[in-house]
Image: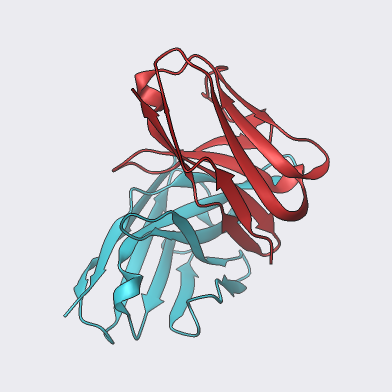
Chain colours: A cyan, B red
Amino acid sequence: EVQLVESGGGLVQPGGSLRLSCAGAGFSFDRYYMSWVRQAPGKGLEWVANIHRDGTQNYNVDFVRGRFTISRDDTENSLYLQMDNLRVEDTAVYYCAREGAYGYSPVFDYWGQGALVTVSS
Amino acid sequence: EIVLTQSPGTLSLSPGARATLSCRASESVSSTYLAWYQHKPGQAPRLLFYGASNRAAGIPDRFSGSGSGSGTDFILTISRLEPEDCAVYYCQHYDNPLWTFGPGTKVEIK
């Protein structure tokens, strides 16, 4: 059974840092692209970043602006999101998601339960 | 940058009714890269459709997706609404290497 479990969420002050982790199980982690998606309170889903199997990273430039870094450790079947210079508007539930491919259609086929990040003074 | 617009924002219908949810792209996109998700409070989002109209595993056939080839308008239909269908539904587009979600349609059961 595919499982994704996030950890590392919590309360942090504006300008602070936090590192989220996502542990994968039940699949060959190193064969998949992985993403982070967030949902702010009362808002919709928003893609944050992804990382390819070869380590190539892509970010949502609308708000990341060099503050977040996505990484992975395939030996640990883990995905990470280092978040620096956090802002109040970064408050959200952060989900990790596996990028699968169905035919030629890429999708997020498995999601974790999410980690809550609260940025507040 | 492709922008997805979903309508209506909220849909309130009775059990057994038919729900029609719209997703419109700001420019023509390939249906291959259009997906739909269901998201219930406190749960992980769930893949409903890939390639606009291909139902994911375990999705009841009360759910159908339309759209093929390239275009700007895609539809998610839920026939015979059930209380368990209460959720927010998102369309999503993949424009290599970036992903975009629509703002979502909330489905309420009266």
- Residue at the spot 69% in from the left edge and 52% down from the top edge: B25
Q: Is residue A8 visible?
A: no
Is A91 left or right of B78, judged from the image as shown? left
Is B31 left or right of B60, judged from the image as shown? right
Q: Is residue B3 visible?
A: yes
Q: Position of residue B42 (x, y in %)?
A: 28, 43
Rendered position, A121 above or below B77: below
Rendered position, A121 above or below B32: below
Residue A51 appears in which quarter of the rendering?
bottom right
Q: Quadrant of the C terminus of chain B?
A: top left
Q: Position of residue B61 (x, y in %)?
A: 57, 17
Residue extending furthest toward the right: B69
Is A11 left or right of A1, judged from the image as shown? left
> Foreground residue, A100 or B32?
B32
Q: Position of residue A5 (x, y in %)?
A: 34, 52
- Residue at the spot 79% in from the left edge and 45% down from the top edge: B71
Is B84 left or right of B92, judged from the image as shown? left
- Residue at the spot 41% in from the left edge and 26% down from the top edge: B85
- Residue at the spot 65% in from the left edge and 34% down from the top edge: B75
Q: How many marks are shown on the rendered structure?
A: 0
Q: Position of residue A58 (x, y in %)?
A: 59, 72
Residue A11 appears in which quarter of the rendering?
bottom left
Q: Quadrant of the N terminus of chain B?
A: bottom right
> Foreground residue, B28 or B60?
B28
